[in-house]
């Protein structure tokens, strides 16, 4: 492709509202353009990259034994009502009506549609296992679209669904997809971790793993062991419980009777630590929730955070959210920041994290605005109520897997997830087959998603520098960028055209910058769009020499024209071998 003919509207500056580096660079490099919040157009460079991502994903799915189909994006509401997700999915589900008033949804995912298809077409255990996949645009009305392609309302996704006759078959299907995902993300050039996770709105009783691209901009916290391969999403992470030693402050408080402290306007843990000279671990934090409409007091140590997912599972809570200020005052008799377990009304359920139950003594709110208690003893001055593990893992906690390592936190971008659905959808949609004994059984299902458009941003977050993007070979829009320094130097022009023709004829994807621009403009654009290999044709072309520059490393070398072609061909072969 000649650059004078390529529509590549680059920008010198990113729009002010582009927060993430990937968002800024994808806009500046002329890869995407925003139409509305969370909705993007992919320009020619962007479409080339998407096609390469799709190709890698398709090959990975085909190698894993999956078969491609295409399901409707517009889905009847009756299917979602049948599965029970129409109301539960919430406002993120894009809903509409046709001219007859029938309700539809634009698919954010396709569990209902694929299950309805299979229940009508697959009837015997002899027809299984089967795994089907598609690559399609999905729709999700995000409350706050942000970070460009990382959180959009319209996005490209690969979703696959497996159907097995038993749990052993599901295990095999799940492992095939897990391994396929690992290969796909490695081929793309991502640094990633597969982490244990919660199934969320997709649901299912089996296991699930999220594939996280490691990046500081990531909205997810990943908990990993510094000694073994244990990794989990923060909400799912476990930790090794160890006996806590008494702090000096706790020893001092235990030796005295509880004391009521005047703490005007001190509502936060940090402010309390500063005012009292204690540690956060000496404080018992009381947080008021509404659990299925009823007040619930949750107690965690001041240096810990409530894990709402664990709380919901442990107490079988369907809806859980923080109580508002009026509810807190009605429940405790005090403003937010002064709640405590001692003196709460009997009707208020109390959930006590195990770390609080192990404390000999602590500082708590007094259920009176501007007052706290010092020296409150768990189990003596207040009942322990429901005890359990209700907190998030914290950095420095012991690893639950290897028993020697410590947990550390990383940030990650979710680029894929694999689920063991079990019979959640087949039971609800009455999708059944005849087993070997002649009995009806529900299909055992799995589902597996990759956010293809999100991968664009995830790759850029990991592969960029101050000058722009550094595309990995496997998905770069072009493999070679030929840049003649001066289009007015006939020898440079002829040399560049010769290289372009020879490399293109060998099957390489080549971009020739034939624009009559200043060298600085050409080099800046070249750095910005990030093609892996740049061949600079300058004055040395008169001697049969050109400069090769590698975008990823910044290394350069001067070689002959034949050497340049041979090196480029070698890189193409390396790329082809990886795909």
Image: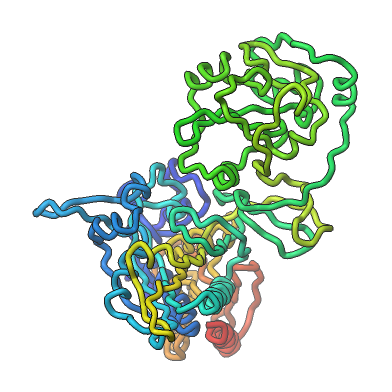
Left or right of residue 253: residue 453: left
Is residue 544 something one can see in this rendering? no
Quarter of the image where one finds residue 465: bottom right
Relative horizontal placement of residue 464, taking residue 123 as reference (left or right): right
Q: Quadrant location of the N terminus?
A: bottom left
Q: Quadrant of residue 42?
A: bottom left
- Where's residue 267, x and y in %? 64, 19
Give residue 40's quadrant in the image: bottom left
Q: Position of residue 285 (x, y in %)?
A: 67, 28
Residue sitting at x 34%, y 60%? 138
Residue placed at 66% from the left, 52% from the top? 237
| Image coords of residue 23 (percent x, y) | 46, 52
Q: Is residue 456 left or right of residue 74?
A: right
Q: Residue furthest left?
A: 100
Q: Where does the image place residue 272, in percent across and percent down from the top left? A: 72, 20
**Is residue 137 shown above or below 491?**
above
- Residue drawn at (50%, 20%) of the image: 325
Q: Nearer the viewer, residue 163 or 560?
A: 163
Q: Is residue 467 above or below residue 165?
A: above
Which residue is at the front of the view, 438 or 136?
438
Residue drawn at x 75%, y 35% is 357
Is residue 193 left or right of 167 when viewed as pictured? right
> From where the camera sits, is residue 237 visible?
yes
């Amino acid at each position: 492709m000649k650059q004078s003919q390529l529509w590549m509207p680059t920008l010198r500056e990113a729009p002010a509202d582009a927060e993430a580096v990937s968002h800024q660079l994808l806009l500046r490099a002329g890869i995407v353009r925003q139409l509305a919040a969370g909705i993007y157009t992919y320009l020619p460079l962007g479409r080339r990259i998407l096609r390469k991502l799709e190709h890698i994903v398709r090959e990975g799915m085909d190698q894993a034994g999956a078969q491609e189909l295409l399901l409707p994006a517009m889905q009847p509401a009756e299917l979602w009502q049948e599965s029970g997700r129409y109301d539960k999915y919430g406002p993120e589900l894009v809903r509409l009506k046709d001219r007859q008033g029938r309700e539809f949804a634009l698919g954010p995912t396709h569990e209902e549609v694929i299950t309805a298809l299979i229940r009508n077409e697959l009837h015997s255990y002899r027809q299984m296992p089967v795994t089907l996949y598609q690559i399609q645009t999905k729709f999700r009305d995000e409350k706050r679209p942000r970070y460009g392609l990382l959180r959009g309302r319209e996005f490209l996704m690969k979703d696959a669904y497996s159907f097995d006759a038993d749990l052993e078959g599901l295990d095999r299907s799940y492992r095939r997809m897990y391994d396929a995902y690992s290969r796909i993300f490695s081929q793309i050039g991502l640094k990633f971790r597969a982490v244990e996770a919660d199934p969320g709105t997709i649901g299912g009783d089996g296991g699930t793993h999220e594939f996280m691209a490691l990046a500081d901009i990531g909205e997810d916290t990943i908990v990993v062991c510094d000694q073994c391969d244990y990794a989990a999403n923060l909400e799912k992470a476990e930790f090794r419980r160890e006996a806590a030693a008494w702090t000096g402050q706790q020893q001092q408080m235990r030796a005295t009777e509880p004391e009521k402290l005047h703490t005007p306007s001190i509502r936060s843990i940090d402010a309390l630590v500063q005012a009292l000279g204690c540690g956060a671990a000496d404080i018992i934090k009381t947080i008021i929730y509404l659990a299925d409409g009823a007040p619930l007091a949750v107690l965690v140590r001041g240096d810990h955070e409530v894990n709402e997912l664990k709380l919901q599972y442990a107490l079988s809570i369907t809806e859980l959210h923080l109580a508002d200020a009026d509810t807190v005052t009605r429940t405790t008799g005090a403003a937010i920041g002064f709640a405590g377990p001692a003196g709460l009304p009997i009707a208020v359920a109390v959930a006590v994290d195990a770390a609080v139950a192990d404390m000999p003594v602590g500082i708590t709110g007094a259920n009176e605005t501007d007052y706290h208690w010092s020296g409150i003893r768990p189990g003596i001055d207040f009942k322990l109520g429901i005890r359990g593990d209700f907190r998030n893992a914290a950095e420095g906690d012991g690893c639950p897997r290897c028993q020697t390592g410590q947990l550390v936190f990383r940030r990650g971008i979710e680029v894929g997830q694999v689920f063991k659905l079990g019979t959640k959808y087949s039971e609800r949609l009455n999708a059944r087959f005849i087993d070997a004994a002649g009995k009806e059984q529900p299909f055992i299902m799995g589902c597996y998603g990759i956010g293809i458009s999100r991968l664009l941003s995830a790759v850029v977050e990991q592969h960029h520098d101050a000058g722009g993007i550094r595309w990995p070979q496997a998905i770069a829009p072009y493999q070679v960028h030929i840049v003649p320094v001066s289009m007015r130097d006939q020898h440079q022009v002829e040399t560049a055209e010769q290289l372009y023709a020879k490399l293109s004829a060998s099957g390489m994807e080549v971009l020739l910058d034939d624009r009559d621009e200043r060298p600085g403009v050409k080099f800046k654009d070249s750095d910005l769009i990030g093609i892996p290999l740049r061949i600079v044709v300058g004055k040395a072309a008169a001697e049969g020499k050109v400069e090769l520059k590698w975008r990823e490393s910044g290394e350069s070398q001067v070689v002959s024209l034949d050497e340049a072609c041979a090196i480029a061909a070698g890189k193409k072969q390396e790329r082809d071998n990886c795909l």
